[in-house]
Image (cartoon, coloured by chain):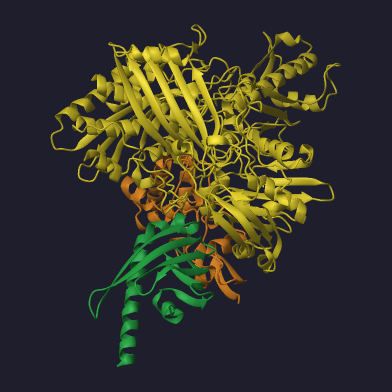
Amino acid sequence: MNITINVKVNGVKYSNTVEPRLLLVHYLRDVLRLTGTHIGCDTSNCGACTIHLNGMATKSCTLLAVQADGMEITTIEGLAKDDQLHPLQEAFRECHGLQCGFCTPGMIMTAADLLQHNPNPNEEEIRTALEGNLCRCTGYHNIVKAVEFAATKMKKEVAV
Amino acid sequence: MSTNGLIGKSVKRVEDKRFITGRGKYTDDIILPGQTYAAFLRSPFAHAKILEITTEAAKAMPGVIAIYTGEDLREVNGVPCGWQVNFKDGTTMKEPKHPLLAVDKVRHVGEAVAIVIADTREHAVDAAEAIMVDYEDLSCVIDPLKAAQPGAPLVHDDVPGNVCFDWNLGNPPGEVDEALKNSAHVTTLEFVNQRLVPNAIEPRSYNSSYDEANDRYTLYTSTQNPHLIRLLMCAFVLGIPEHKVRVVGPDVGGGFGSKIFHYTEEALLTWCSRKTRRPVKWTATRSESFVTDAHGRDHVTKAEMGFDNEGRITALRVKTYANLGAYLSTFGSCVPTYLHGTLMQGLYTTPKINIDVTAVFSHSTPVDAYRGAGRPEATYLLERLIDLGAQELNIDPAELRFKNFIPPFDGVNQPGYQTQVALQYDSGNYEGVLKKGLEMAGYENFRNEQKANSNGKLIGIGISTYIEACGIAPSAVVGSLGARAGLYEVGQVRVQPTGKVSVYTGAHSHGQGHETTFAQVVADKLGIPMDDVEIIHGDSEAVAFGMGTYGSRSLAVGGSAIVKSIEKIIEKGKKIVAHKLEASADDIEFANGKFTVKGTDKSMGFGDVALTAYVPHVYPKDLEPGLDFSSFYDPANFTYPFGCHIAIVEVEKATGKVQLKRFIAVDDVGNVINPMIVEGQIHGGVVQGVGQALFEGADYDENGQLTNASYMDYCMPRADDLPMIETGSQVTPCPHNPLGVKGAGEAGCIGSTPAVVNAVLDALWKGGYTVKDIPMPLTSERVWKAMQ
Amino acid sequence: MDENVLARLVPGISRLERTGDNTFASTLAIKLGPVSGSFNGSLELEELKEPESFVLKVQQKSSIGNAASAIKIKLSPVNEQQTEMEFNGVVKLSGLLASMGQRVVGGVSGTLTKQFFSNLESELERKQSAST
């Protein structure tokens, strides 16, 4: 028995009829074709599928599409506003915070959540916030730097 | 010839834009018209007879298009091994068939037994679960030592004693025995280099389609080397014509070796796409990845190092049992031999060396190259022995290294260094990196602090100095050693009529940043803006032929091929300009993107020359139009990057918990094109090496079950486990390639593991504990136990 | 052996059918930490020495892996009212069960054992109240 859901993704309203067992991440990737959200595991440990659900960083493999009914979702594709990259997106490029790019969308979404709640995190706080996101390429070094860089940049923007 | 200073600059990566905005295109992102999905039924047993497979119920399930079992593929070849190693007596290694689907027997947990093709992923999985298989569970063996014992359960009936081959390299064993006997001291270490799971975050993914009207195949695959996959799949497995097959490696989410190999699923999906006339896609779940991606390491070794009264190394004798898993993977045979045994010289002047390797099959996932491949195992062996030797001889481990280093040589004024184990090093300054590393670490201060330390904290410092053989590889050399392929690379530089440049390389970027580094080289050499250069890779239809990316080879081999083509372009450009400006080609100079007649102000820009080549109205009579060159570069030798890694750790007495406090990496990778990217490679490599030392390891139980086959159980290094990595560099150019580069992809992973383990042991030794070895990973439990 | 009683005693059993003198076909629903599934298979009583001991052989198959176990159960009378029950067994897991469930097997088997005994207690109480 399929169920109809209504969601707003990256500012656009969608109404789709889905199988009750469809995971949110598969809905985003296969139904909406927003393939920036990645799947790296099947135990909700890697964080590659992290999105914002009603503004909160959420691993989109941990819930069903039907559970997101009525909610607002932001994926990596919706993070840049009016072609203006999010400071974290810029920072990841600036600091070489990515190599193969596969964990990057999830990393950025998690980091964005961190900076919303803690605009001035120290290294330890950044590392703790990112421990639910796995990266096999960077050794996290430049990812931590990128988050620090973005935090500084966002503070400056607020100050202006 | 460097003209606009791009070489050596930390240029930001051009590929990043698509990745940070979620527009990368990985294989699983691709959905083709008429797409179908595959799911596998895999063996839950390590070793069992397949008595019966019942697929009727599954076939009747919704959406199912086809189900195939091993029986349907009895006549299809298995996947081949790319490197032939011979037994010591000269006979060929044992190469049992590695079938696309198990026939009659399964030999490791996760081996594919049946494939279901359905209209959706969910339907395919549902039907796979409905297939009934009757197994007769048989006894199994996982440990390589036990597998080689008489009476061990056989993996393949036609491989007696489970031995794939035995192999020996170096000085005659008798001479080494003699040298050890005459040594003042012999340090002996028996240890395990544990099995690792590579764990690229993108799981393997394939999408294969067949166009019946044109009899053409297209395979999208998460691979590090599309051409190699095409060659192996067409010529060895399916027997389909190579020119009818296009293999594309689009964006690939990390490889670390595990995506070099030709996997059974690639060929099987291609076979199925023709059978069903539909595109077939499969993406591994992480649970599948754990038991089907080729694993790394898994050596059991006994090593003895002799010293004279002065602390100089007199001899090295090594015996290694290497676990190959249930089947020979693509390069499974060369990793423990030609990528491991040949590195036993290390950085030292050891006069007598012999290594003996027995490679055995076991009922486990196949083992192959994983970042470093053989060289981390060799480095771990040598660097652990040196430190243990220093402890036993009561010499400082840094001093013992200085005593034994090969003196500096540049490979130009001084010849390369001939090792006892076949290789000839190109250039090196080993004292240099250790000196720099000690300085960065504040070694003397640390030692004083350690001595003065009275509050009971255990602190330790560990050194590792490593060398690796990269820039793989001179074809003639590897051919004589058993490689079944050449290891050159192609580089095509196509100048468009407007002067924009498309570059086609057979190297493949899956995180290394070739689109940036290679563009820097081309833009620098041609004196044009980087924006005017695009690097195209990963598509067998676009690129002539290439061997792909592994063994830190892309820039040293692939970059050199591009440079060769650039030289041809400049050469031809000079002829065009000479004709147009009525001068002799010998009098034309090229610099900063401009061709100039020597000693005059007559010149032509690069763009004008390109346009002239394609609109050849005023043009030399005997010159072809166009400005497009392709070159193959076959290196003269391996390259030999080296370095010094130093770890500082704190060990908690009460719990045995190891905290990595600092990590210093000084790497000499030859000339550097983009320091930012090289540092990034080092960071990532170091953390993978730290992962092996402290966290990771595949745990098989006695029934052959991999008991930590998920991210809940397999401990991957996480952001909060690590400090910032302090990097330093030294440059000793490679004397034999045009860029002077050596390669940086694996260095971090090779140097770091023994540095961390040595640091932990140093902490224990200085704290008064007598312990020779703690098996990796050095978990709290193991360290604590060692302290009791 | 009364299969209806056995079905009530063994936690997770949803179906138990006698297929021979001492063999049964069963369906079990079990959750092991992150993995749960429905198992189909057989129960077999071997070395049956009524009333003191028997070996319960269980072979179960499911999409998440297989389980094979042999549990020796020994009953010895302590006095008129009390019987001591001793059990000892080996379980072999495979597939997803082994790779992802192994970590929690100890805990789950403890819970299931407790459940078995509390089921047994209530069964005995039921019998007792029925007989009085």
Q: Residue at x 64, y 45 (%)?
A: B264
Depth check: give the residue in front, B567 or B631: B631
Residue B150, position in %: x, y? 48, 36
- Horizontal side of A58 relative to B210 (left or right) equals left
What color was chain B assigned in the picture?
A: yellow
What color was chain A assigned in the picture?
A: orange
- Above or below residue A104? Residue B768 is above
The answer, for residue B145, to whether it is visible in the render is yes
Depth check: give the residue in front, B233 or B526: B233
Residue A51, position in %: x, y? 49, 59
In which quadrant will I find the N terminus of chain B?
top right
The answer, for residue B592, to whether it is visible in the render is no
- Above or below residue B533? Residue A120 is below
Residue B22, position in %: x, y? 56, 51
- Horizontal side of B216 relative to B7 (left or right) equals right
In which quarter of the view is residue B438 placed?
A: top left
What color was chain C assigned in the picture?
A: green
In which quarter of the view is residue B307 placed?
A: top left
- Furthest residue in direction left, as rendered: B454
Residue B543, position in %: x, y? 71, 34
Q: How many marks?
A: 0
- Above or below residue B524? Residue B114 is below
In which quadrant will I find the C terminus of chain B?
top left
- Furthest residue in direction bottom, as rendered: C132
Q: Residue at x 30, y 42 (%)?
A: B782
- Above or below residue B240? Residue C126 is below
Q: Residue at x 44, y 57 (%)?
A: C92
Depth check: give the residue in front, B645 or B186: B186
- Furthest residue in direction front, as rendered: C49
